Structures are given as C-alpha cells and as structure tokens.
Amino acid sequence: MQTTQKISVTPFQQADNLVKMLLQENQFRTLMAYYRSAMVEIETKFKVLNESLSVTHDRNPIETIKCRIKDPRSIIEKLLRKGLPITLESIEKYIRDVAGVRVICAFPEDVYLLAEYLLKQDDIQLIRVKDYIKNPKNSGYRSLHLIVKVPIFLANEKRMMNVEIQLRTIAMDFWASLEHKMKYKKDLKDADKIADQLRKCAADIAELDLNMQKIRNQIDKKDDWDSVSHFPIHIDMDA
Ligand code: GTP
Ligand code: MG
C-alpha cells in the first residue's frame, strides 16, 4: 500500500487524513491483528513463566502485565517524524513498538530473572536490549527494554513479529506513571528545577528498591543479586 500523494494541508490534518486512509485498508487491519496476536503470545509466555516460577522458586515474580497496541495516529506521527514512507512495509520494518507488553515485578532481581527466562526460549529472537536500570535515562527513567521477534502461526504461514517489552518494578512504574502525567503540563516555569526534583525522586526510589531487595534476600537467606549471576544466559548488551 502506498499513500504518497502530496496533500496541501496542515501536518495535523495530514496525519488525520493518513489515519483515515490506513483504517480503510484491509491489509492494515490484518497487520494490526498480527501484532495483537504477537502481543498475546508474549503475555502468555510471561503468565506461564509466573506459574512455573511459583512452583520452582515459591514466588510469583509478576505483579501486573499491561498490553497495548500503538494507535494508528501515533504510528503515522512516528513515521512522519522519522521521515519514513507511510507504507505497511515501513511500519513492520521501522516501528518496533507497535505491540507493547509491560511487565511489572515486585523486586529488581525479578526483572532480570524474567528477561533471562524469556530470552532462553528457542522461538524468541532478541533484536535489541536497552537497560535503563543499569544506565538510567537523563530524566531518571528506569526499566529494562527488550525488542524481540516472536512467531505467530497463521493458516498457511509463520510470521515473526516485533514486540517491545518493558520490564520494571512497582516502584519504577510508580515513578514513570507520575512523571509521564506531569510531562504533559507544558507551561512549566521552572522546568529545569522540576527535572532535577524528578531525577532525585527516581534515585530515592531506586534506593528503596535496592533496600526492599536486600530485605527479601535476607528473608530468603541468600546473597544480594546472587540468583541473577547464576543464570546461564547473559543478556547481550550490544544487541
Ligand atoms: P520511541 O520512539 O519513543 O519509542 O523511542 P525509542 O525506540 O528510543 O524507545 P526507548 O527504548 O527510549 O523507550 C521509549 C518508551 O519508554 C516510551 O514510549 C515510554 O514508554 C518509556 N520511556 C522512555 N523514557 C521515558 C521517560 O523519561 N519517562 C517515562 N515516563 N517513560 C519513558
Ligand atoms: Mg515507543
């Protein structure tokens, strides 16, 4: 599908028109159905891991799983922003967060535990890792981001679909949700001061996470972070 004709309208109207055109395309709706299927596959894998770890490790590492499909307007805006053609091919090739799964865990160790177990599965292909826990963003944002490809099985073919996975603790999620809400208050006077305060809150929250992890490890009578280092697979940070 190509929608390359020139439209002499504002960028806002242009995006609106393109969204309308996309939504009328059967192939676009089919592609979104593929992404929804891939998202469900990943969600199910995490639910199964949670069940399995509840037996082997006597705990449920996952608190909540949230899934979302990027809405067509955000897809169009991202393509326009990146100067990419508005085609189904470029959505599949360049927009790797159409399907998103957010996994919220109780403790930082659980984030890495789940990531390692997911990446060990032989049908999962790792495309990219961004560890914003070890290397927080300048805003203070912390989470482990993975882009993976997961197969979906259709009537006559198998397709590998991109899914963005964000793993974080309850504390990191609390910070990210509130910061996200506040970011949209545009007319901030002391923007720099506020950014500093948010960074400080993120650092305090990270310390709390670490302390809670230590308490849990004390209860479990094991050394800090030892379980993570025992896993056979290590996430390749250059992926
Ligand atoms: P995008 O084009 O935004 O998807 O950029 P990217 O591909 O470089 O993605 P990145 O791995 O940096 O993560 C993007 C996603 O992480 C966003 O959609 C948010 O959900 C989350 N995120 C990243 N930075 C922040 C932040 O500073 N605050 C909050 N609240 N969320 C963030
Ligand atoms: Mg994104």
Image (cartoon, rainbow, N blue to C red):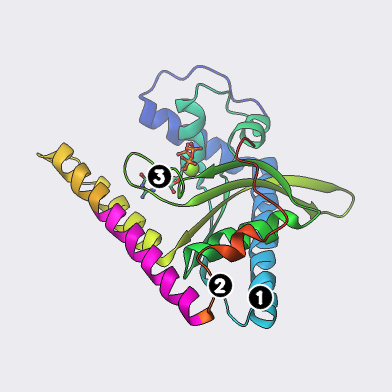
Regarding residue 152, the answer to whether it shows in the image is yes
Using the image, determine if residue 12 lies above or below residue 150: above
Label tally: 3
Residue topped by disc 3: 136
Residues in magenta, as a range: 201-219
**Label 1 close to label 2 by CB (< 8 Å):** yes
Using the image, determine if residue 3 lies above or below residue 21: above
- Where residue 131 appears, x then y in whole percent? 51, 45
Residue topped by disc 1: 53
Report the Cα–Cα distance between label 3 and label 2: 22 Å
31 or 201, nearer to the observer: 201
Report the Cα–Cα distance between label 3 and label 1: 28 Å
Q: Residue type at mark 2?
A: Pro
- Left or right: residue 116 versus residue 173 is right
Q: Is residue 210 magenta?
A: yes
Report the Cα–Cα distance between label 1 and label 2: 7 Å
**Label 3 close to label 2 by CB (< 8 Å):** no
34 or 165, nearer to the observer: 165
User: Dot 2: what SS?
Assistant: loop
Q: Quadrant of the N terminus?
A: top right
Q: Residue type at mark 3?
A: Pro
Mark 2 surroundings: few (<14), some (14-19) or many (≥20) residues within 10 A: many
Residue topped by disc 2: 61
Using the image, determine if residue 68 lies above or below residue 157: below
User: Dot 3: what SS?
Assistant: loop
Mark 3 surroundings: few (<14), some (14-19) or many (≥20) residues within 10 A: some
Disc with the residue nearer the chain's start (1 vs 2)? 1
- Left or right: residue 211 versus residue 239 is left
17 or 75, nearer to the observer: 75
Q: Residue at x 14, y 41 (%)?
A: 193
